[in-house]
Image (tube, grey):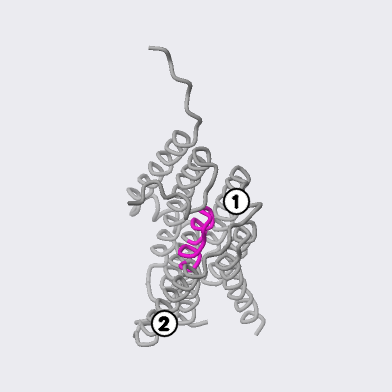
């Protein structure tokens, strides 16, 4: 009973944050909506049996990405002070697209027959140790490739965002 | 909650992200819409991981990779936004029409 209430609270957090992020005009409220939604998702991950992924969600998404977005907002302040008038045509088109998408997916989900496993796997298979073992043996290449992508992204971000150097006299 | 209800929550979150990505005029808000869609995808993966897959490490590693790629994507996207702001003093997606035909 209590567990159900907690799960529905997390679902409500996810949806309320998403609505705030989708429909608010002030960029700060959009960022706060993203944060609320990510927090609810971390709770749902916890519920689905993976405390490690939930912790990573909070650490990287809420602690890293959301804060980076706040910094970008502060560095490009002009639109944050005076948000532009919304474009009702665009908003209507977006809502129509989203409703069509949601209807189609909901129809698919209702019609699908999933072969569900009888009971969740053992406690040992869900442990962080098993996760780390798989990451360093079976998924080793993916792990290395991801580190390489992150390194390249850091270098690329620095190169793109730096101020242009003064031209040297040739 | 059953698998179907988790999938419905994921679809609803994806739709909200789609609305955000298509309707906002601020480039940062567009980025946030895309982030919401990626998170809906990872919620789906975690739900399938819990209810359908026999080896539960697979889905968790998928989600960790999504989180890592999202971090890389946000870093690049934000630096591009800063560059655009420095060049045009504006990040309104409807005013950046220099390349449109």
Q: Which residue is disc 2 drawn over? A: A103
Residue sitting at x 44%, y 19%: A167
B62 shown above or below A143:
below
Q: Nearer the viewer, mark 2 or mark 1?
A: 1
**Numbered disc 2: secondary structure:** helix
Q: Nearer the viewer, residue B96 or B3?
A: B96
- State the image coordinates of residue A12 (x, y, percent, origin top left): 61, 75
Residue stretch in magenta: B18-33
Provide the residue designation for mark 1: A79
Compare residues A118 and A65 and report the one nearer the observer. A65
Badge 1: how crowded within 10 Å, few (<14), some, or many (20+)? some
**Vertical side of B49 occupied by A63: above or below:** above
Q: For the view shown, which residue lies furthest in the bottom direction?
A: A111
Q: Residue furthest front?
A: B101
Q: SS class of the residue under badge 1?
A: helix
Query: Does B23 lie within the magenta span?
Result: yes
Q: Say which label, 2 or 1, has the lower sequence index.
A: 1
Marks 2 and 1, Cα distance to the nearest angstrom? Answer: 34 Å
The residue sitting at 53% across, 53% down in the picture is B28
Location of residue B34 in the rendering, given as x and y in whole percent from the top left corner: 46, 60
Measured as percent of width and height from the top left, residue A157 is found at 46, 39
């Amino acid at each position: 009973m209590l567990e159900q209430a907690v799960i529905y609270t997390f679902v409500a957090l996810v949806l309320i944050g998403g609505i705030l992020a989708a429909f608010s005009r002030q960029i700060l409220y959009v960022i706060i909506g993203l944060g609320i939604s990510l927090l609810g998702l971390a709770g749902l991950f916890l519920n689905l049996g993976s405390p490690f992924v939930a912790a990573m969600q909070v650490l990287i998404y809420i602690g890293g990405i959301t804060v980076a977005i706040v910094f970008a907002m502060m560095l490009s302040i002009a639109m944050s002070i005076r948000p532009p008038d919304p474009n009702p045509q665009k908003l209507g088109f977006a809502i129509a697209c989203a409703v069509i998408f949601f209807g189609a997916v909901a129809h698919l989900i209702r019609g699908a027959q999933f072969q569900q496993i009888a009971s969740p796997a053992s406690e040992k298979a869900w442990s962080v140790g098993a996760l780390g073992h798989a990451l360093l043996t079976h998924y080793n290449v993916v792990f290395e490739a991801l580190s390489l992508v992150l390194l390249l992204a850091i270098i690329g971000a620095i190169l793109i965002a730096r101020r242009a150097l003064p031209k040297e006299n040739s | 909650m059953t698998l179907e209800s988790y999938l419905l929550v994921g679809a609803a979150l994806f739709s909200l992200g789609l609305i955000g990505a298509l309707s906002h005029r601020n480039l940062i808000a567009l980025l946030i819409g895309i982030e919401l869609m990626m998170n809906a995808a990872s919620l789906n993966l975690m739900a399938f991981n819990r209810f359908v897959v026999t080896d539960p490490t697979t889905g968790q590693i998928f989600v960790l990779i999504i989180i890592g790629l999202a971090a890389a994507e946000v870093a690049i996207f934000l630096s591009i936004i800063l560059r655009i702001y420095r060049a045009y003093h504006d990040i309104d997606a409807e005013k950046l029409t220099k390349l449109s035909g």
